[in-house]
């Protein structure tokens, strides 16, 4: 499995717009939380890949008593499980480092002797 791409958005309205855009491109919602949405592309392989696997599977099936026909579902399952995923999350403001307060010279404690 491939780790998903991460897309950060600023607020919930932008997240909904981005989710809608991905859904029109053929993605489905795999998991949805309050601040994140995981989308996965519906993919069972390309037409060219399926045609090539049918041809190769047919040729191999002749010599292996039909075992070559397993190439077709193996390709489709591989394409489905390796389909791209996108994680959309709302970006959180990074906490700023606390500013260093400079002590004034008259406030600094003197070491005791």
Image (tube, grey):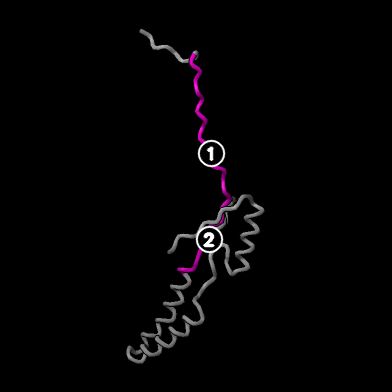
Mark 2 and mark 1: Cα distance apart in space: 26 Å
Between residue 69 and residue 9, name the one nearer to us.
9
* Residue drawn at (33%, 88%) of the image: 64
Q: Classify 10 Å Cα crowding around label 1: few (below 14), some (14-19), many (20 and above).
A: few
Image location (x, y in percent) of residue 29: 57, 62
Image location (x, y in percent) of residue 59: 38, 90
Label 1, secondary structure: give it. Answer: loop
- Dividing the image into 4 quarters, which one contains the N terminus? bottom left
Whether the magenta-drawn stretch holds residue 24 is answered as no
Q: Classify 10 Å Cα crowding around label 2: few (below 14), some (14-19), many (20 and above).
A: many
Q: Which residue is mark 1?
A: 95
From this view, report whether residue 13 is shown above or below residue 64. Answer: above
State yes or no: discs 2 and 1 in contact (Cβ < 8 Å): no
Q: If you read the primary sequence from the N terminus, does the residue marked by circle 2 or circle 1 appear first? A: 2
* Residue drawn at (46%, 76%) of the image: 76
Q: Which residue is mark 2?
A: 86
From this view, report whether residue 106 is shown above or below residue 38. Answer: above
Span of residues in magenta: 81-105
Q: Is residue 41 left or right of residue 112?
A: right
Q: Assign the magenta stretch its main secondary structure.
A: loop
Between residue 105 and residue 4, name the one nearer to us.
105
Q: Kindly give the residue lying farthest to the bottom in the view shown.
A: 62
Whether the magenta-drawn stretch holds residue 102 is answered as yes
Q: Is residue 11 left or right of residue 99?
A: right
Label 2, secondary structure: give it. Answer: strand
Between residue 37 and residue 90, name the one nearer to us.
90
Q: Is residue 98 left or right of residue 25?
A: left
**Discs 2/1, front:** 1
- Dividing the image into 4 quarters, which one contains the C terminus? top left
């Amino acid at each position: 499995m491939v780790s998903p791409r991460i897309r950060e958005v600023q607020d919930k309205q932008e997240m909904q717009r981005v989710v809608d855009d991905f859904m029109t491109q053929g993605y489905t919602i795999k998991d949805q939380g309050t601040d994140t949405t995981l989308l996965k592309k519906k993919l069972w392989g390309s037409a060219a890949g399926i045609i090539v696997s049918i041809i190769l599977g047919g040729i191999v099936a002749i010599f292996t008593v039909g075992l070559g026909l397993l190439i077709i579902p193996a390709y489709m399952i591989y394409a489905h499980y390796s389909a791209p995923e996108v994680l959309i999350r709302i970006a959180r403001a990074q906490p700023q480092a606390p500013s260093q307060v400079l002590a004034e010279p008259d406030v600094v404690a003197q070491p005791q002797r």
